[in-house]
Image: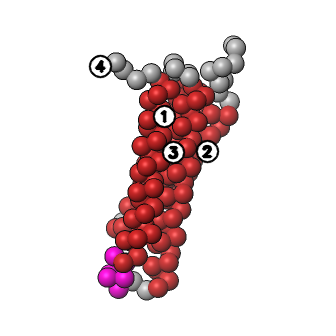
Amino acid sequence: MTTLNYCKRWLLIGCLLAALAVLLGAFGAHSLEGQMEDSNLSQADMQKRLGQWETAVRYHMYHALGCIVVAFVSGPIARSGSRLAGIFFLCGILLFSGGLYGYVLTQVRFLVLIVPVGGLAFIVGWLLLAFSRPASLPK
């Protein structure tokens, strides 16, 4: 079995993350509200949680697409700037979106406290990507 080159690996990661974002968005749109109604939340609390879920899904998708951009910027070999950008995008999805998903579902306060760290990871990822050298440009 051959190993995936760096570009294909990031393309696969980005596409899988995008598919997961669509799945979680569909869950939020079609099932989450019903589950919240069963838990006797106030209408205001329900709307707040649904908004948080939507924000998590939106940023999840943006950064899944960012991982796909990393695939095309990096080329077939690992470049430090783009590699780090992809890693920061993954960490951001886990901390920002994952923290919001978990908070909406469980209301565990710790989870919402890690969300800003994920936002910072997103910012660092975009800055690293902005200053990385694309694969097609000469040194």
Give whichever of discs 1 and 4 has the lower sequence position. 4
Q: CA distance from mark 2 to mark 1?
A: 21 Å
Q: Which residue is mark 2?
A: 123
Identify whether 113 is placed above or below 51: above
In the image, residue 79 lies at what x, y percent?
55, 22
Residue 39 in magenta stretch: yes
Asked whether, in this view, residue 74 is left or right of residue 5, the answer is: right
Query: Is residue 113 something that shows in the picture?
Result: no
Q: Residue at x 54, y 37 (%)?
A: 68
Span of residues in magenta: 35-40
Q: Nearer the viewer, residue 121 or 130?
A: 130
**Residue 46: which numbered mark, if any?**
none
The residue type indicated by label 3 comes to Ala
Number of other residues with Cα within 10 Å of mark 1, as a class: few under 14, some 14 to 19, many 20 or more: many
Q: CA distance from mark 4 to mark 2?
A: 36 Å
Give whichever of discs 2 and 1 has the lower sequence position. 1
Q: CA distance from mark 4 to mark 3?
A: 26 Å
Q: Marks 2 and 1: CB-CB under 8 Å?
A: no
Give whichever of discs 3 and 1 has the lower sequence position. 1
In the image, residue 87 lies at what x, y percent?
49, 35
Q: Which residue is mark 1?
A: 11
Q: Which residue is mark 4?
A: 1
The residue type indicated by label 2 comes to Ile
Q: Main secondary structure of the magenta part?
A: helix
